[in-house]
Image (tube, grey):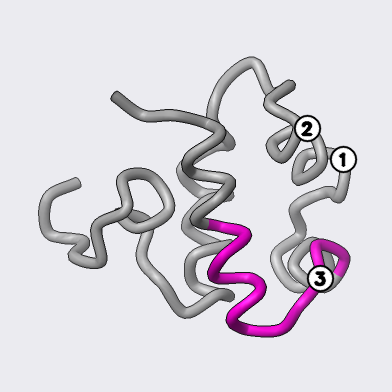
Amino acid sequence: MLSLGESYKRYSKKRNEKGVTNYRVAKATGVTQKTLSLWKNGKLECFPKVETLAKIAEYLETTLSYLLEGKEDDTCI
């Protein structure tokens, strides 16, 4: 089962590995800082849109599968 909290932890790990802030991710992807904050605090009503997550994954040089499920391979989405 997909978990908002777990997906944010994976996002945060990749963001930290890249050495960027939520502000930088927001500016580069067009995602609002409010969305990132709500995601972090578990206050989003649902996952960010797939298009949004894809932009974030591309910016962080990872896969959508990793952000959603912790899998580095995108072939099973």
Residue 20 against residue 65 in the figure, above or below: below
How far apart are the alpha carbons under marks 2 and 1?
A: 6 Å
Residue drawn at x 44%, y 29% is 3
Provide residue 11's location: percent of width, then percent of height: 56, 57
Q: Which of marks 3 and 2 precedes in the sequence?
A: 3
In terms of depth relative to the viewer, which is nearer, 6 or 65? 6
Marker disc for residue 34: 1
Disc 2 marks which residue?
38
Direction from residue 72 to residue 4 in the image, left or right: right
Circle 2 residues within 10 Å: few <14, some 14–19, many ≥20: few
Marker disc for residue 21: 3
Direction from residue 33 to residue 43 in the image, left or right: left
Provide residue 25's location: percent of width, then percent of height: 74, 68
Which corner quadrant of the image does residue 12 belong to? Answer: bottom right
How far apart are the alpha carbons under marks 2 and 3?
A: 15 Å
Whether residues under marks 2 and 1 lie with C-beta atoms below 8 angstroms apart, the answer is yes
In terms of depth relative to the viewer, which is nearer, 65 or 50? 65
Direction from residue 28 to residue 46 in the image, left or right: left
Q: Amino acid at mark 2?
A: Leu
Provide residue 59's location: percent of width, then percent of height: 58, 75
In terms of depth relative to the viewer, which is nearer, 18 or 58? 18
Q: Secondary structure at mark 1?
A: helix
Circle 3 residues within 10 Å: few <14, some 14–19, many ≥20: few
Q: Is residue 2 magenta?
A: no
Counting every numbered tag in the picture gives 3
Q: Amino acid at mark 1?
A: Lys
User: Magenta span covers which residues?
Assistant: 11-23
Residue drawn at x 75%, y 52% is 31
Q: Which of marks 3 and 1 precedes in the sequence?
A: 3
Q: Secondary structure at mark 3?
A: loop
Residue drawn at x 59%, y 80% is 17
How far apart are the alpha carbons under marks 1 and 3?
A: 13 Å
